[in-house]
Image (cartoon, rainbow, N blue to C red):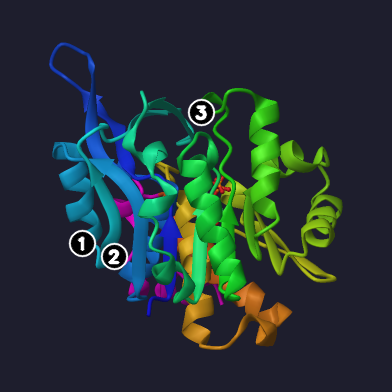
Amino acid sequence: MFDVVALGELLIDFTPAGKSANGNTLFETNPGGAPANVLATLAKFNARTAFIGKVGTDQFGSFLGDTLQKGKIDTQGLVYSKDVNTTLAFVHLKEDGDRSFQFYRSPGADIMLDEQEVDIALVQNAKVFHFGSLSMTHEPAKTATLKAVKAAQEKDVLVSYDPNLRPALWGSLSHAKETIIEGLQYADILKISEEELEFITDIRNLEEGSQFLFEKFGLKVVLITLGSKGCFYRFGKDTGHINGFQVNAIDTTGAGDLFLGAFLYQFIKKEVSWDLVQAHDVEKMILFANATAALGTTKKGAIPAIPHLNDVNELIDGRT
Ligand code: ATP
């Protein structure tokens, strides 16, 4: 049995790595894909994790499979395809450490995952099932994703959802909104950014937007990440803002994924059902998630930047 099983995109992030002698930008191959980043964070803290997705039988696909295995993430659900290439994405960093993405999917292997290839037993035996919205931009991966999430719900597996908005990957913004909302019906734990909150609800106010989502979709907790400012949460009638940690951020790639992986780790570590979780537990879980993600921004890439548990605890001890 696994603590957390995730399904979704697994790809190469080409991250800027300085300039060549003639002044051209150099890119470094980093493993990427939000669901895998979430699992890698959990696995680094020793939680039992498994990944479901598709890559090509090319060098990039082998690199990604090896990366998951080295990170102690089970790969029995990872499908290698001869028919499609591993998906590639280029990351462009802005001066403040924020970034934009350009995806190369024509189509990429990630969106070619077929429902027949999803190991339902893997999903139904997990404590938490995690998914995002990028595996729902195209078929057949959308049907595969929804099959997995419905199977999780059927067996009362807690469902975590991060509807990452990447406008360039969708046919249109209305398609993105409709599909992101479709995924919300199955979610228990929702992690979104302020921008995504407004996109989904047309509400800017965190109290009101989170209440709308909480009630409409029967969520168990809403986590709204606020970059360096930390996180706003709604847990039933309880809401609060947990401040972020001040660090020297150089690359925020995957900060949201490290945040969510760390949050889920704290839940797994409690070894209780979600019904026993209280508002003060949620606050501690967010504090830990803020610290993990903050440390993650001080290094390049997502998976290579996941901090050691000791360093996270040290950062928290320094504040309290
Ligand atoms: P993604 O785009 O990766 O899905 P996101 O939009 O959810 O991410 P952010 O809100 O930027 O991500 O960051 C997630 C978390 O990472 C924040 O809640 C915070 O804890 C931490 N974080 C992000 N940027 C910084 C920063 N500059 N300094 C400290 N902590 C940060």
Q: CA distance from mark 2 to mark 1?
A: 5 Å
316 in the magenta segment: yes
Magenta-drawn segment: 298-320
Q: Label 2's element? A: strand
Viewer-nearest residue: 120 or 235 = 120
* Residue 219 rendering spot, x and y as whole percentages: 73, 64
Residue for point 82% across, 37% down: 202
Q: CA distance from mark 1 to mark 3?
A: 28 Å
Whether residue 48 is situated above or below residue 250 in the rendered picture: below
Q: Quadrant of the N terminus?
A: bottom left
Q: Amino acid at mark 3?
A: Leu
Report which quarter residue 281 is drawn in. bottom right
According to the picture, the residue beneath numbered tag 1 turns out to be: 69
In the rendered structure, are the residues bearing label 1 and label 3 in contact, judged by CB atoms less than 8 Å apart?
no
Whether residue 299 is visible = no
Residue 169 is marked as 3
Q: Label 3's element? A: helix
Q: Label 1's element? A: helix
